[in-house]
Amino acid sequence: MVGGGGGGGEQAGIGQELRAADPAANKREFVVNVESSCSFSLNSDSHLLTPRNSAFFVPPPPPTTTTTQPKERGRWETVVLAYKTLGVVFGGLVTSPLYVYPSMPLKSPSEQDYLGIYSIMFWTLTLIGVVKYTSIALKADDQGEGGTFALYSLLCRNMNIGVLSSKQVQTNSSFSHPVLHEGTENKSRLEIFFERSIVARRALLFIAMLGTCMLIGDGMLTPAISVLSAMEGIRAPFPSVSKSSVEALSAVVLVVLFLLQKFGTSRVSFMFSPIMGAWTLCTPLVGIYSIIQHYPSIFKALSPHYIFHFFWRNGKEGWLLLGGTVLCITGSEALFADLGHFNRSSIQIAFLLTIYPSLVLTYAGQTAYLIKNPNDHDDGFYKFIPTTIYWPIFIIATLAAVVASQSLISATFSVIKQSVILDYFPRVKVVHTSSNKEGEVYSPEVNYILMILCVAVILIFGDGKDIGNAFGVVVSLVMLITTILLTLVMIMIWRTPPWLVAIYLFTFFTMEGVYSSAVLSKIPEGGWIPFAISFILAFIMFGWFYGRQKKIEYELTHKIDLGRLGLLLSEPGIQRVPGLCFFYSNIQDGLTPILGHYIKNMKSLHKVTIFTTLRYLLVPKVAAHERIVVNKLGLEGIYGCVIQYGYADSLNLGGDDIVSQVTDSLQGYLQNCSRCLTSEHHEVQEEISAFEEAKLAGVVHIRGKTRFYIGKNCSWFERSMLAFYEFMHSNCRSALPALGVPPPHRIEVGMLYEA
């Protein structure tokens, strides 16, 4: 399960432990395996610290044996992955011919109108699909993840432009152009502006949140419009079938699809890919047949002058038609957001060699048919299918529409996981369905909420045009947000030449801005749906972020250092009671305020106390000898411990197993330190004996459970936001994975943080 941070043991959130020592930073952390040597913290501006007088235990960088970049996939494996992407990534994009023409409010269109529309669709697919996403966006990954929030995370990891967050992201990343920690003289003016302006940083965060929420809205609308458009094909040969029957059947199909999600993307994609392969092959063949039969010269429309003539003739009406035309590129954001489920090469191969040619030929065939049958645009897909192959195509189209839903469902899981890890979204259960692919995830709660919303959209807004209007709003705004964030990546991270950035920004911001202006006019006609959903999601994200920010501010202000801990333990009446205590915390350069609260009220601390941090790594499994790293802090019986684990590791170890593993690691650590520091052998034996005695006396696991105390001095805004945060916090999942600790050995220490 993936979780965020909180107070005390409750705070031991996974996202917090994505931190690693930055090789470019002034301070370098060096940790040697506990089986071979001691653990040191080496500063460029200080002396070598021994384990006994080290201030705090500094978590080591990720294990070298597990964090190296994987070798380049073989050609055959990449081809297999490219085949699998058909069933997950491109479903929404390649099935767009089902609903593009029916979504356009055409009125007595002429041959020249259709040629202009096809020219617009061709250049939209070419510029946005091939140039923007396939050639540029896929290179802007954040540790293999894609999407708008991954772009925001990428910017924050490389520059100091993030708003103070409960997850101060300092992780190494696999960028091609790292510039973190450069001097001010090497920074661009834009970067300096963002670093100095809190308003600009908050605006950037809002844009990233909005893009994430819009993509989630896309994940709700894609299944609805795809399946409903495919099922409409039943009514052509059987006019007696009612519209409500088609809607009910569409809802049943979607429920079955969502119930299949728990089996994982790999299994689903392997089952779905043959369907999409058949669709991707059949529709362009039908398109070629239609071109030959109806309008062989259709490809003259590739000349951009048809676009200018189209707008010159139609004016405002032509501008409004863009609300339907933009749907030809729907699903392109999933191409980027699903990057974590596959890899860059496989997605590029699949799009350039299959999806793009298929769409160009299919739309050409549809347009050729409509030029000769101009009034059939309300059913622009099924009418252009030859009668002899109608039913086979209908079956393939229905199955393909189901698969199309998968692309945005998978993308939604990915962005939710990213948001949870970065602590911008309440903790939900995230299950890794693959043992060798970190980005392949499934969230039960998100899955069932999406299912309910999709079915509601179909049953309440059954008209495909209304759903298409809503869909256009999502598609255009998500693309526009991605363009803005990519521009910032080019300027501040890649250091792209200004003239190239200007060409990119002018081309795509203009194109997507015009599309957005057209679809915003559709807000009263169904376009309000994604706005309402996005607003609710953005409010949830902001409320969670605000609460986490307040909590981390309190913890940083009231953290306990070793000096203060020593003073607390030296106070009269404070006793060191027998026993072994695992005290869970996530603060790296201090101890959680809950520790002071516990000592003051309990008047005691166990003779052996181990401050334990759980550290989540972006690797499948952590080697057994690197999983537990311990260090002795500067007080008697006080130790630091980091339990490292990957996304395929199980943390249900059982309480006794954790204790025995930590004991073995601690013994090895003390023995190695005795050799490093020429300590007396009997001192080491005394420490080991004290540890064994404490273990026999009893083991307890302590974690914090914090809440805000909202005082009278708080403003109405703080009161409302913190109350909303507390509601979400009390109903979301725990940040501390189970670990299999028996309930009798668990203690929760409650504490109120004053807002």
Image (cartoon, rainbow, N blue to C red):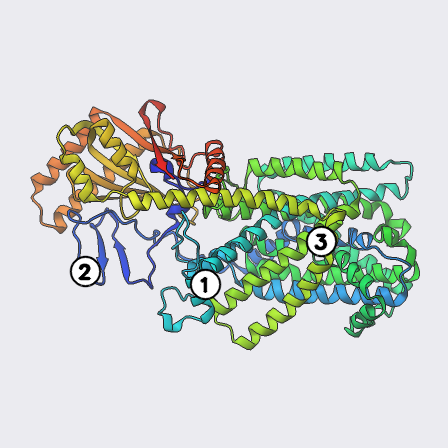
Count residues near mark 2 (Cα–Cα under 10 Å), then give few for <14, some for 14-19, many for 20+.
Answer: few
User: Tag 1, which secondary structure?
Assistant: helix
Give above or below for 174 relative to 748. below
Q: Residue at x 68, y 35 (%)?
A: 256
Nearer to us of marks 1 and 3 is 1
Residue 721 at x, y = what percent?
48, 40
Q: What whole-number distance in Å separates the C-alpha atoms at marks 1 and 3?
A: 31 Å
Residue type, numbered disc 1: Phe
Residue 612 at x, y = what percent?
30, 39
Label located before the other in sequence (1 or 3)? 1
Give above or below for 455 relative to 139. above
Q: What whole-number distance in Å separates the C-alpha atoms at marks 1 and 2?
A: 32 Å
Q: Residue at x 53, y 63 (%)?
A: 139
**In the picture provided, is 386 more to the left or to the right than 67?**
right
Label located before the other in sequence (3 or 2)? 2
Residue 387 at x, y = what percent?
90, 50
Q: What whole-number distance in Å separates the C-alpha atoms at marks 3 and 2?
A: 58 Å
Q: Residue at x 21, y 53 (%)?
A: 40
Residue 194 marker = 1
Question: Do the numbered discs 1 and 2 sit on residues whose CB atoms are within 8 Å?
Answer: no
User: Tag 2, which secondary structure?
Assistant: loop
Question: Mark 2 highlights which residue?
Answer: 46
Count residues near mark 3 (Cα–Cα under 10 Å), then give few for <14, some for 14-19, many for 20+.
Answer: many
Label located before the other in sequence (1 or 2)? 2
Residue 472 marker = 3
Residue 424 marker = none
The foreground one among 524 and 669 is 524
**In the picture provided, is 629 more to the left or to the right than 506?**
left
Residue type, numbered disc 3: Gly
Could one spot residue 359 in this view of the protein? yes
